[in-house]
Amino acid sequence: MLVDFFFELRRARVPATLREYLTLLEALDADLHGWSLEGLYHLSRAALVKDERFFDRFDQVFAHHFKGAEMDLDAFEVDVPEEWLRKMAERFLTEEEKALIESLGGWEKLMETLRERLREQSERHQGGSRWIGTAGTSPFGAFGFNPEGVRIGQGMSRHRRAVKVWERREYRDLDDGVELGTRKMNVALRRLRSFTREGGDLLLDVDGTVRATADNAGWLDLRWERERHNRVKVLLLLDVGGSMDDHVRDVERLFSACRAEFKHLEHWYFHNCPYEFLWKHNSLRFSERTSTWDVLHRYGRDYRLIFVGDASMSPYEIVMPGGAVEHWNEEPGIVWMRRLLDAYPSAVWLNPVRRRAWDYVESIGILRDVVEERMFPLTLTGLDEAMRSLS
């Protein structure tokens, strides 16, 4: 079973070596896995994976290979899981019922009301329309519905209407090793690379010299050609988490194609809209942040800036201080967008949402204006248009 698991990891392009596999066997002989599937998971990941970029691929292979390998014989005797009970409390409304629920009337009113509720509320509530609680129509809480509110403690989005989220959410880094479906993207991105080549030092044209010497009856006839430098530099800013979870596969294909095509590629993550900090690794986004000012000063104006995101969010996240869904931002996202665009005049926004849906999302319209209509769909045609714009 472990041999098959090892080769399945290799087929998934997780760079596990034979030496690491033998180390895993030695650890298993020493009973370090505690004779549990969870112990085997942690032990094998520690032994076989040396780069956190491959954690997600390892998890997928492990789940596929060992699915059903462990069964809890006491499963019918345990209490009903708390998560099941919480799901029973979720509130699902008809479209007619949703239409009757009104928002509080703007960002300032929402924040002011939340402060009042926090001062006044002293106990748990469920199913109501006023207090911070669950399964109701209040603007504050979880597992209910409101056209505009603050989500607290739900763990995931259900209606995608929250303008603020009070919980720690985990995002994973995008995989830059995806191969399937990237070839056509490579061809589209290559258009930008072709526009940024220029002549440099002379190099010996070996094939041309051989042909010319043969044509010259053996007399040496040296032929030269100019070295061609790929000097394109790309700064890739990737929206991650939330509604972007629907587009992970397409964005990973783009990321992989960019890795293959651009020698000088720098990437950073943001959520919904860039603010005062960016990050390199999603698992460390709360502890290892980099000031956006530092990023602006680190890369020169010769970089091409590519935003990748669905631009789908509450408009407050773009135009209001404090509007960021996960933290309190002193300056609106639109201010940071304009700073980035001023620093990198050659910029585009790639949007995985279909173009025909853009007119129905207010935040997409705002960002299209900010980038001066340089927003393109994440399709082959859109990529081609974007590369022409960047060139």
Image (tube, grey):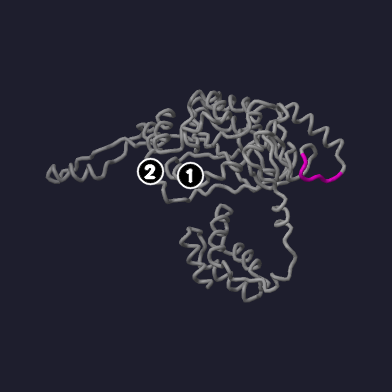
Identify residue for label 2.
184
Quarter of the image for residue 117 reads top right
Identify residue for label 1.
250
Q: From the top left corner, tell me how far across and down residue 286 is, in percent.
A: 69, 43
Q: From the top left corner, tell me how far across and down residue 344 is, in percent.
A: 52, 27
**Is the magenta region chiefly helix, strand or loop?**
loop
Q: From the top left corner, tell me how far across and down residue 284 is, in percent.
A: 66, 46
Q: Can I make out residue 294 in this image?
A: no
Indicate which disc, 1 or 2, sits on the residue closer to the N terminus.
Answer: 2
Question: Which element is circle 1 on?
Answer: helix
Q: Nearer the viewer, mark 1 or mark 2?
A: 1
Left or right: residue 91 compared with residue 263:
right
The residue most toward the left is 217
Q: From the top left corner, tell me how far across and down residue 110 is, in percent.
A: 74, 30
- Total count of labels: 2
Quarter of the image containing the C terminus? Answer: top left
Compared with 115, 261 (above or below) is: below
Check if residue 193 falls in the magenta segment: no
Q: Amino acid at mark 1?
A: Asp
Which residue is drawn at the image coordinates 48% and 39% (left, top)?
264
* First to last magenta residue range: 123-128
How dense is the environment of label 2, judged by Cα within 10 Å: few (below 14), some, or many (20 and up)?
few
